[in-house]
Amino acid sequence: MFRGIYTATNGMRTDSKRIDVITSNIANSQTTAFKKDVLVTESFPEQLMVKLNGVENNLRPTRQIINVDPPADFQTNDSIVSIEITSGYLRMEDRHGIGYHKSAKITRDEEGYLRTALRDSDSNTHAKFGAYLLDVNGNPISAPDGAITLLPNGILQAGGQDVARIITAVNAQVIGTMNGGALADRSMINFNQGNLDPTENPLHVAIEGKGFFKILDMQDNQIKYSRNGGFSINPEGILVDYSGNVVLSASDNEISVPEGASKIDIDKFGNIVATIGGEPEEIDTLGVVNIANTESMIKQGESYLTMADGIEADEAEFDGQVLQGYLEGSNVDIISEMAEMINLLRGYESGQKVIRSYDDIMSKAANEIGKI
């Protein structure tokens, strides 16, 4: 009886956290270059349900049907492969424990292990946060390159090689699976492009496409990344951002603007040209880079981003363009965020009603049935 209360409560807690994320997004909808957060949710691991006084070691005679999509001829090493079975279970392990599933969408992580995958806002596939696919002995599976297939006997193959047996058989006392509802897993950043707003300020620059400005935080001497191009020149002639931190060049040095410069031009590649005494002079290039592992970036406030502890930024060549006289707005759509919040509030109220119903049932069980 109490299981329904736990499921409803977990759903309400998850909805509450999603509302908090949406509230933060709406509050920052006018913040320059703000990137909205998205709460990633998942279900608790599926646990086996066992009937009392079941017969031991009697395999369920269910016909096995296996479906692997896409077929081997259409797979690459980066493909997300969907596996579905009708008899037995696939065991998956994440930080919440081991779950039993009839289907799974897997891909290889950076070390070659098979894990569940997700796609980010740019449709890139990530497996670093996914659950591991386990063999029948409970070990994570490392698969060589090649197409993934599953034989009727439960042997998973990769590139034509037998890798591991992955289908866990169950006995007749197992009647299915259940979980404890949904939970908040992690918050991820949506890096979709925001609107480009003209400002006519020559020291305002926006990035069109992927990429980040490199900023040296003067408080902790740490390099941070930002898409807020609201720059200015400090009294020492150094190009700084709105917080007074140093904007770095392509060579990770500070950018010094010569005294007496009458005009500053910045081209689409980030090259800075100052007009001095009527003559144009190229003084430096903005440090703008792409980050390949954006899924490991975390917010530090004031539009700054850094890498998570223990992870190095995988910097790549900038392939977007820099627009002078523009600032990028936030990528928050207030209308869609408000609509999502209304739906979540309705779901939260439904959870309250479920708990209230369970409370009434338990009250009757204790106060009325108990009198008989």
Image: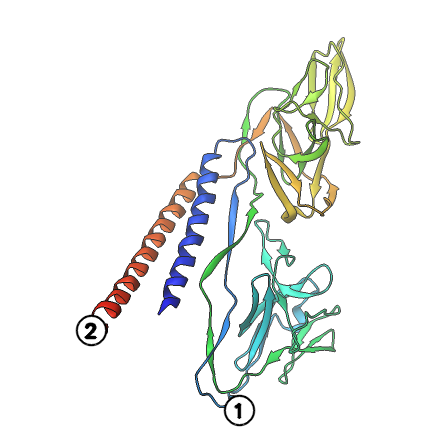
- Residue 231 versus residue 273: which sits nearer the camera? 231
Q: Quadrant of the C terminus?
A: bottom left
Residue 347 drawn above or below residue 201 = below
Q: Amino acid at mark 2?
A: Lys
Picture coordinates of residue 226, whole percent (x, y):
64, 34
Whichever of callouts 2 and 1 sits on the residue coming sooner in the sequence is: 1
Residue that protrudes farthest toward the front in the picture: 371
Residue receiving disc 2: 371
Q: How many marks?
A: 2
Picture coordinates of residue 218, whole percent (x, y):
70, 26
**Distance in Å between CA atoms under marks 2 and 1:** 43 Å
Q: In the rendered view, does 279 fall on the left or right side of 341?
A: right
Residue 201 in view (yes/no)? yes
Q: Which mark is residue 58?
A: 1
Picture coordinates of residue 171, whole percent (x, y):
52, 86
Classify residue 275 by image quadrant.
Answer: top right
Q: Quadrant of the N terminus?
A: bottom left
Picture coordinates of residue 128, whole percent (x, y):
65, 57
Mark 1, Cα crowd under 10 Å, few <14 / some 14-19 / many 20+, is few
Q: Amino acid at mark 1?
A: Asn
- Residue 74 versus residue 114: which sits nearer the camera? 114
Say which residue appears at 46% left-offset and 68% top-offset: 179
Q: Which element carries disc 2, helix, strand or loop? A: helix
Q: In the rendered view, does 65 fall on the left or right side of 111?
A: left
Classify residue 98 by image quadrant.
Answer: bottom right
Q: In the rendered view, does 160 fall on the left or right side of 198?
A: right
Residue 82 in view (yes/no)? no
Say which residue appears at 76% left-offset and 25% top-offset: 254
Say which residue appears at 72% left-offset and 12% top-offset: 261
